[in-house]
Amino acid sequence: MITNYFISDIRVSFINNQKLVSYVININLSSTNTLINVNNIKGAPKFFYSAGMFNLQKKQKIRQPKAIIIILRALLLKSKIFRTKPVAVHFNNLFFNYQSNIFKKLKRKVFTKLVISYIFGSHNGCRLKKKKRMKIRTRTRKL
């Protein structure tokens, strides 16, 4: 698991009994779908969107920037809370180039305090991937 931190100071501190982060926006990319969850700081879900809710099908659901931008546009139109309340944004399995582009667009509309990126790529350690064995066939002569 590789973690990139855009903001180095992640400690949750309290100023006048007020939390630094009120909501967490999880942007999740699986191999088959794009999901966005909005939770409060305690973990209770507030909003949930997937690419299928916007009639995106097959390759459109996993095409990274397009699906995320469509879903975020609908989310931000529905709720005006994020402009005033501080938000943490978590990216899961999103390419680094797309993270910066989406973060720039999101920063204009949302008051973000923290951005964390998780890349869950399976790996085989130092071993190379197993190669497919090819059968060596010899021709038989027919008499």
Image: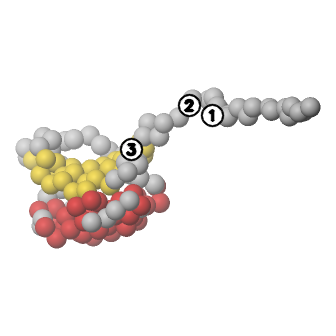
**C-beta proximity under 8 Å, tags 2 and 1:** yes
State left or right for residue 66 relative to residue 132. Answer: left
Cα distance between the residues tagged 2 and 3: 18 Å
Cα distance between the residues tagged 2 and 1: 7 Å
Residue under circle 1?
129
Nearer the observer, 65 or 16 = 65
Residue under circle 3?
118
Determine if residue 19 is in view. Answer: no
Residue 11 in picture, x, y percent from top left: 26, 40
Residue 42 in picture, x, y percent from top left: 12, 40
Kindly report which numbered mark, 1 or 3, lies closer to the viewer in this rendering.
1
Which image quadrant for residue 111?
bottom left
Q: Is residue 42 above or below residue 29?
A: above
**Marks 2 and 1, the one that precedes in the sequence:** 2
Quarter in which the N terminus is drawn: top left
> Looking at the picture, which amino acid does disc 2 mark?
Asn
**C-beta proximity under 8 Å, tags 2 and 3:** no
Cα distance between the residues tagged 1 and 3: 24 Å
Quarter in which the C terminus is drawn: top right
Using the image, tell me which numbered label, if any, was put on residue 124. 2
> Looking at the picture, which amino acid does disc 3 mark?
Tyr
